[in-house]
Amino acid sequence: MSTRPTAPRESAVERHLVQRCAEIGVLCLKFTSPGHVGVPDRVLMGHDANGDSVTLFVEVKRPGEVPRPNQVATIQKMRDHGQHAVVADSKSQVDVLLDDYFTRPAVPITERDPHDAPLPGRAGHIVTSLY
């Protein structure tokens, strides 16, 4: 029997996202798009601390896991169409992401370029830089 600790499952990170969104009053819906592969797991909708409407797509991963190439391509297409899409692979990243977009935004959503969407805890900010 192995005593090596295992990394939290993706579902634990996603569950944390759902719970934190409920706590701060952000709608957090499971996102699917039949016929399209690589779409993010969740779509978040709410208002930030400035009162601006925010829609954010979130791909959830287990700690240390990176998006598959088709997920990167889909996120890039979404960003090319003006949508904010990010990746979170830990509970702490979820917390930073929610602060950054909803509870304590340093930059108003109206002034953000979706291509520069932060990936908390990662060097570089563009998801395509992971490949």
Image (cartoon, rainbow, N blue to C red):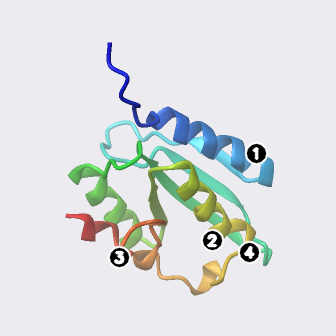
Numbered mark located on residue 52 in the image: 4
Residue 50 lies, in percent from the top left, at: 78, 78
Give the residue pinned by disc 3.
124
Mark closer to the chain start, 2 or 4: 4
Residue 123 lies, in percent from the top left, at: 36, 73
**Quadrant assignment for the C terminus:** bottom left
Give the residue pinned by disc 1.
22
Mark closer to the chain start, 3 or 4: 4
Label 1–label 2 contact, CB within 8 A: no
Q: Which amino acid type corresponds to the residue marked 1 in the rendered image?
A: Ala
Q: Is residue 14 left or right of 37 when viewed as pictured?
A: right
Label 1–label 4 contact, CB within 8 A: no
For mark 3, give the secondary structure.
Answer: loop
Q: Relative to residue 110, is residue 42 depicted above or below? A: above
Residue 118 or residue 64, whichever sits in front: 64
Give the residue pinned by disc 2.
100
Q: Which amino acid type corresponds to the residue marked 2 in the rendered image?
A: Asp
Mark 3, Cα crowd under 10 Å, few <14 / some 14-19 / many 20+, is some
Q: Which amino acid type corresponds to the residue marked 3 in the rendered image?
A: Gly
Residue 2 or residue 69, whichever sits in front: 2
Numbered mark located on residue 85 in the image: none
Using the numbered discs, state the Cα–Cα distance from disc 2 to disc 3 in whole angstroms: 16 Å
**Quadrant assignment for the N terminus:** top left
Mark closer to the chain start, 1 or 2: 1
Label 3–label 1 contact, CB within 8 A: no
For mark 2, give the secondary structure.
Answer: helix
Mark closer to the chain start, 3 or 1: 1
Q: Relative to residue 37, is residue 125 depicted above or below? A: below
The residue drawn where x is 63% and y is 57% is 95
